[in-house]
Image: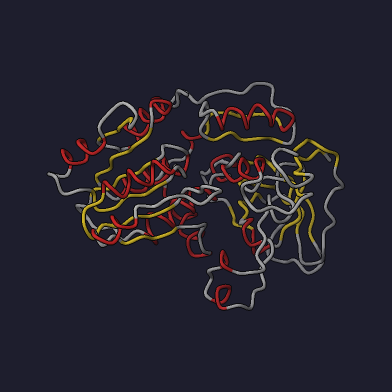
Amino acid sequence: MNALVKYEKGPGHVALMDMPEPVCRDDQVILEVNCCGICGTDIHVYHDSFKNYPPVILGHEFTGRVVGMGSRVTSVKKDENFSVLGAIAVTCGKCSYCYRGEFMFCRNRRGMGHGVNGAFTKYVAVRPDQCYRIPEGVSLEEAALVEPLAAAVHAVAEIAKLKLGDTVLVSGPGPIGMLCVKLLHAQGIKIIVAGTSADRERLEMMTRFGAVRTVMVDREDLAAIIADETQGEGVDIAIECAGAEGSVRNCMHSLRPLGQYVQVGHFGKDLQVPWDLVAFRQLHIKGSVGYTRETWNQTMKILEQGSVRVKDLITHHLGLAEWQKGFDLFEKKKAIKVLLYPDQVTNDFLFEATRI
């Protein structure tokens, strides 16, 4: 079967290759992949700035249909469609983190798409406990975005301690930043979004998603705008989604004393942080990585209830053979979410609601 493979360490070293179909253990199911979204993690693995274990098939934001199952599997049925929690492909199941459902911190954890084979291919083998039934009325494409939505839910609803009346700065208008804005808007929070002039069209989308103000930091005075929007106090919470050093500084300088800083974006390197500012404003610094099982359950409920729409983030549909085009669109900010399909797609298209 064709698969997009990171075949050795180092920048690049990714190619479409012929790989054997997965063998189904007696406690696994075989899924035929419907579609799989390109994620920032895939780009980091491509550039070798995210830990990976080649040779490995990339891709972890996906849905699939059951086409085979092991003899011990009784909880799923053939032809059912599922969203898949790929982050728990390998965990020890015994450590204190696994016991509490905080599997992201298990020392033995390996997720799909970088630690074990992922879903930029035709078939995958997973355990039934990784499979979540797709709610009625939610499309296969929308359900492929459960993973990034869960990451945003974790940051907004579990890490940040929001209060009604708060003003929140979201820095970085990429897919995760957009999902954070949608979640914040659903809770009635005042939102300011920061990006650059390269993000102009994405910032326009953020206004439609609920931001009261957007700022191109390379052309506008972010500090003055924050002061104007907060009566000189500063924002209550800053959520950094860009994974850029300048964005970190902007977020920290925008916070009021005792404000909360939530780090969501990944850098792939160390960077300078204004620690004196952190100390003298007594800022609360929090990291947000991945999600928990409870987060995933909550995210499925959010999709089922329709309280946050994700369809308008899907801008391109491409066949797996066009993966390079998809990666390029994503890196150059010409797309929001690109879905790759195992079989060729005759036309890539943009939803009418999204102009990128």
Residue 261 position (above or below residue 7): below
Which residue is located at x 43 percent, y 45 percent? 241
Residue 171 location, quadrant: top left
Residue 141 location, quadrant: top right
Residue 326 position (above or below residue 41): above
Query: In the displayed structure, does residue 288 sit left or right of residue 169?
Result: right
| Percent of width and height locating residue 255 | 25, 51
Numbered disc total:
0
Residue 310 position (above or below residue 22): above
Front residue of this view, candidates 10 and 95: 10
Front residue of this view, candidates 199 and 272: 272
| Percent of width and height locating residue 344 | 73, 28
Quadrant (top left/top right/bottom left/bottom right) for the N terminus: top right
Which residue is located at x 43 percent, y 26 percent? 198
Front residue of this view, candidates 79 and 41: 41
Query: In the displayed structure, does residue 323 sit left or right of residue 354?
Result: right
Tell me how the rendering is colored.
secondary structure
Query: In the displayed structure, does residue 253 sit left or right of residue 154?
Result: left
Front residue of this view, candidates 134 and 165: 165
Which residue is located at x 64 percent, y 55 percent? 86
| Percent of width and height locating residue 243 | 47, 45
| Percent of width and height locating residue 199 | 41, 29
Query: In the displayed structure, does residue 213 sit left or right of residue 32?
Result: left
Going by the picture, which residue comes out furthest to the left? 231
